[in-house]
Image (cartoon, grey):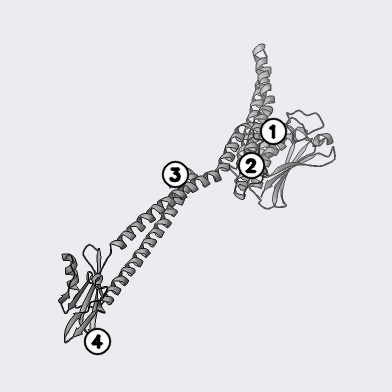
Amino acid sequence: MRRFRTLRGRLTALAMVVAVAAVAVLTVAFNVVLDRSLNADANSRVRSLAAAAAATVGYENGVLRVHESVDDAVVDRRVWVYQGTRAIERPPATTDLQRTADALAGRAHVFDDVPGGDVRLYAAPVTVAGRQVGTVVAAESLAAYDRTTDLALLGSLALAAVLLAAVGFLTWTTVGRALAPVREMTASAADWSEHDLAQRFGATPRPDELGNLARTFDALLDRVAASLRHEQRLSAELSHELRTPLARIVAEIELLQRRERSSEDRGEAYAAVARSAEQMSAILETLMAAARAEAQIESGRSEVGRVLDGVADGWGPALAEQDLELDVQRPAAPMMAGVDAEVVERIVAPLIDNARRYARSRIVLSAAARDGAIVVSVADDGPGVDVDAREHLFEPGRTAGVNGHGGAGLGLPLARRLALAIGGDVTLTPQEVGAGAEFQVRLPA
């Protein structure tokens, strides 16, 4: 089967193998049955001939005598009569035939064939008072039977060849026609995947197998289209979110190149370039983490309390410089999240950074188990989120506060994107304006 590379060829070959086996069994069975039938007929004919000849033999005074009848001329040409081993009547015959007939003298109810198998002989006893006093040997030519079996064998082989050719042709044609729609659908799916991802096979009535194939192709095209949209969205987000820090770097470098600046100005420019580069690095790492999570390259697990401690260690010094208190409320009992600690930190970090921009004096970082998930909360005592801004809060370029703090509006969208990629989400807890803001990160347990 490995030599046949197409399904059509393999199915045809399989059908031919089955057909050859079936035809071979039928041909052999037919010829065996025919041979046995003809063999039984030959035995019956030679037995009848011997019985007819024995009826013409009499026993008088210890001597066998043959009484002639109307058909004796025909019978005599194929009958030997023996008294003991002595031939009383012997027709003309070949040496092999005579030798075989003599060997049957004195025997009863025995068949034998002349060497070469073209004549069959049968020994019938002549009995008197239950005692065998002689033997009649009759011969029957097997030439007609052999000719019949030969013709039957040739005919059956010819018929088998015709049947096999018909099976091969019909199978090849039928399978080809059955697979034609599959080839057309495959070609259409390949063409659509390259040129028109909006095309689908739809709900056009088809046989069950082709309907399942059409639905499979449609699902595959949907996944290809979704993957392409994902790549396009990732490229768009990369270009959009890297534009602000990159523009800031270019502007600072151009200013440094165009005119002389004091050492303090140069230091501030270098610091701005460094901050923008760090921001670009963070954006890229977050997007790559989201892409890996969406591709399910990694999942992992982490202890939430330790993750909160890690976030506090990383952000504590920066918040202290702004006279902000970071209150970490670790869970009373250990809680395991079904995601790596690094990914959790990358989701929470933009929320801490956002809270840092708007908090007056305090940021609260806490975690709790809720409805089969882990919920990490980041709350601040700032002015809160403007009602009009809440609807578009997680769109790139939008800001969360009402007090004019700067920011590119990229952190919250990145945090939600990464959370969604690992099967969670980032949401804003509705509160009154002026009562602060609270963001909740939902993680798989």
- The one nearer the camera, 41 or 79, is 79
- The one nearer the camera, 7 or 373, is 7
Q: Tell which tag, 1 or 3, sits nearer the viewer.
A: 3
Residue position for label 4: 130
Question: Residue 218, labelled with which disc?
Answer: 2
User: Answer yes or no: do the residues labelled 4 and 2 have beta carbons within 8 Å?
Assistant: no
- Specify the quadrant of the image occupied by residue 442: top right
Give the Cα distance between marks 2 and 1.
52 Å
Side of 90 relative to 208 (left or right) = left
Secondary structure beneath dot 3 equals loop
At x 83% / y 39%, what residue is drawn? Answer: 435
Q: Tell which tag, 3 or 2, sits nearer the viewer.
A: 3
Q: Tell which tag, 4 or 3, sits nearer the viewer.
A: 4
Residue position for label 1: 318
Where does residue 174 sit, x and y in percent of width and height? Answer: 52, 47
Give the Cα distance between marks 1 and 3.
70 Å
Image vertical order of residue 87 relative to residue 263, above or below: below
At x 64% / y 28%, what residue is drawn? Answer: 280
Question: Residue 4, labelled with which disc?
Answer: 3
* Residue 331 appears in the figure: no
**Badge 4 local density, few (<14 within 10 Å), some, or many (20+)?**
few
